[in-house]
Image: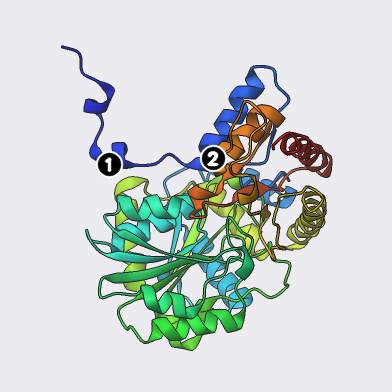
C-alpha cells in the first residue's frame, strides 16, 4: 500500500498556509519561463544593488578570514554598532546583551513568538499585517487576534481597538511601521495612545517591526520603544534588507529586554546558530557609514510612489490612498468583485490578482494574505519604465471587465 503525501507530513505543515508573496512570485517566474513578458510587482525587494562600500566591507572580511562560526546572538562589533544605531536614530538604549542578530528579521519574529507563546496564548495582530506574522504565531502555538483598519483610516487602527482586543491571554501586540503591506506610518501621537493602552497591562509586550524605517516619506520615524511608559516592554525589530538593499544577505536584528534576548538566542542556537560572519562585518559598516545611498534610494521610491498613485488614479474602480513609507500601494479593489470579461468572473481579490497575472502578465499579491479581503498589494520596487507598462496593462485588462 502506497503512502500518500498527506500521510507523510505533519499536521503543522498541513495546516500551514504558503507565503502568498513567494507563491505569486513563483507563478510569475513560471509564466516567464514559458516565454511570457511578465512584470512582477509581488515581492518586497528593492531593485537597487547593495551599496559598493558595504560589498567592499564584505570582501575585506572574507580576505581577513571571517568565514567561521559566529556567536549565536551575533558578532560583538555588530551588536555594538546596532546599539549605536538604536541610540542615534531611535532614542533606544540597549547593551549588546540585549541584541540578537538573526538570519533576517523574519527569524527575529519567529524567535520571539517561540520564546513567548504557549498553546492558547494570544497575540494582538494589527492588520493589514505582513503575511508571515499570522502563520508564525500559529506555528508557535498562539492565536492571532486581528485588529483591522480600512483604506478610509489609512489602514491605521486606533488605541481603542487595541484595548478592546486585549484579553487575559494576550502576550504581546505586533505591528509594523512603516507598514508592509500598506506603507502606512504611525505618528508619535498614534503610537503614544497605543502605548498608554499597553502600559496598563504589565505583562504584555509590544513587538515593533521597523524594517522599513529608512523608507519613510514623513521624515519622522517614531519608535514606540522610545516612549518611557513602554520602554522596558518593547522589542524593536529591524534589519538590512530594505534600507540597504541587502535582501539576499539575510540579516536582521532585535533589541529588547535582556531576558527575552537570552531566550531568543537559546532558540536560535537550536535552529540556525549565528548568521554569516562576513555579512555581519559588512552590516556593521552599513550602520556606521554614510547613509547617502539609502537616502538616494528613498528619493527614488518617493517619485515612484507618486507616479503609481497618479497612474492608478486614472483607472476607474481603484480606491487608492497615499502611503507614507515602504514601497507598496495597497488599493481597495472591491469595485471589481462580481465583474467578468465574459470568461473570467472576479469573485474576490485572489481572482482579481490571478486575472491580472494571466491576462495582463503583471504579478501582484491578493489582500487576504495580509488580512485585508478587499485589497491587493503592488510593490513599486521596480523601474519607472516597468511601472508605467505594468499599470498600462492593468488598465487595459480591467477595462474589459463589465
- Kindly report which numbered mark, 2 or 1, lies closer to the viewer in this rendering: 2
* For residue 168, side relative to residue 154 (left or right): left
Q: Secondary structure at mark 1?
A: helix
Q: Residue at x 57, y 64 (%)?
A: 150
Q: Which of these two is toward me, 7 or 86? A: 7
* 265 horizontally vs 222: left or right: left
- Compared across the picture, whether 347 is left or right of 33 comes to left
386 and 332: which one is in front? 332
Q: Which residue appears at 73% of the width and 46% of the height? A: 48
Residue 364 on image: x %, y %:
63, 41
Q: CA distance from mark 2 to mark 1?
A: 29 Å
Quickly name the residue at label 2: 347
**Residue 373 in the image, given as x and y percentages of width and height:** 51, 51
Indicate the quadrant containing the N terminus: top left, top right, bottom left or bottom right: top left
Residue at image mark 1: 12
Q: State which tag comes first along the sequence, 2 or 1.
A: 1
Residue at 70% from the left image edge and 66% from the top image edge: 324
Are the residues tagged 2 and 1 within 8 Å (C-beta)?
A: no
Q: Residues within 10 Å of mark 2 (few under 14, many from 20)?
A: some
Q: Secondary structure at mark 2?
A: loop
Evaluate whether residue 71 shows in this view. no
| Residue 123 drawn above or below residue 5 | below
Q: Which quadrant, please, contains the C terminus?
A: top right
The extreme left residue here reads: 1
Tell me what residue is drawn at x 64 percent, y 58 percent: 285
State whether residue 233 appears in this view: yes
When the figure is inspected, residue 227 is found, relative to residue 235, above or below; the finding is: below
Amino acid at each position: 500500500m502506497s503512502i500518500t503525501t498527506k500521510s507523510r507530513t505533519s499536521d503543522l505543515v498541513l495546516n500551514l498556509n504558503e507565503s502568498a508573496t513567494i507563491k505569486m512570485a513563483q507563478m510569475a517566474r513560471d509564466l516567464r519561463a514559458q516565454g511570457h513578458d511578465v512584470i512582477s510587482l509581488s515581492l518586497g525587494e528593492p531593485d537597487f544593488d547593495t551599496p559598493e562600500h558595504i560589498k567592499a566591507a564584505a570582501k575585506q572580511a572574507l580576505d581577513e578570514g571571517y568565514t567561521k562560526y559566529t556567536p549565536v546572538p551575533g558578532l560583538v562589533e555588530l551588536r555594538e554598532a546596532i546599539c549605536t544605531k538604536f541610540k542615534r536614530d531611535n532614542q533606544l538604549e540597549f547593551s549588546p546583551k540585549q541584541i540578537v542578530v538573526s538570519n533576517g528579521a523574519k527569524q527575529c519574529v519567529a524567535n520571539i513568538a517561540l520564546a513567548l507563546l504557549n498553546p492558547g496564548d494570544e497575540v494582538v495582530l494589527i492588520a493589514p499585517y505582513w503575511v508571515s506574522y499570522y502563520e508564525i504565531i500559529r506555528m508557535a502555538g498562539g492565536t492571532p487576534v486581528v485588529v483591522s483598519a480600512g483604506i478610509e483610516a489609512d489602514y491605521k487602527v486606533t488605541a481603542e481597538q487595541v484595548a478592546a482586543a486585549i484579553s487575559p491571554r494576550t502576550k504581546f501586540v505586533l505591528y509594523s511601521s512603516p507598514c508592509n503591506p500598506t506603507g502606512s506610518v504611525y505618528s508619535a501621537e498614534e503610537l503614544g495612545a497605543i502605548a498608554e493602552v499597553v502600559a496598563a497591562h504589565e505583562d504584555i509586550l509590544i513587538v515593533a517591526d521597523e524594517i522599513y524605517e529608512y523608507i519613510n516619506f514623513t521624515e519622522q520615524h517614531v519608535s514606540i520603544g522610545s516612549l518611557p511608559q513602554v520602554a522596558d516592554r518593547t522589542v524593536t525589530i529591524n534589519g538590512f534588507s530594505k534600507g540597504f538593499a541587502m535582501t539576499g544577505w539575510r540579516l536582521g536584528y532585535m533589541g529588547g529586554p535582556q531576558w527575552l534576548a537570552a531566550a531568543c538566542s537559546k532558540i536560535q542556537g537550536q535552529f540556525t546558530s549565528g548568521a554569516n560572519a562576513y555579512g555581519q562585518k559588512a552590516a556593521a559598516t552599513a550602520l556606521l557609514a554614510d547613509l547617502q545611498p539609502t537616502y538616494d534610494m528613498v528619493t527614488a521610491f518617493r517619485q515612484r510612489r507618486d507616479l503609481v498613485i497618479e497612474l492608478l488614479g486614472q483607472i476607474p474602480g481603484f480606491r487608492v490612498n497615499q502611503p507614507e513609507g515602504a514601497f507598496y500601494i495597497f488599493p481597495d479593489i472591491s469595485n471589481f468583485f462580481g465583474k467578468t470579461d465574459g470568461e473570467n468572473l472576479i469573485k474576490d481579490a485572489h481572482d482579481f490578482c490571478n486575472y491580472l497575472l494571466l491576462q495582463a502578465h503583471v504579478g501582484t499579491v491578493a489582500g487576504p494574505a495580509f488580512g485585508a479581503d478587499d485589497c491587493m498589494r503592488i510593490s513599486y520596487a521596480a523601474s519607472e519604465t516597468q511601472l508605467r507598462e505594468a499599470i498600462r496593462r492593468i488598465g487595459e485588462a480591467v477595462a474589459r471587465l463589465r
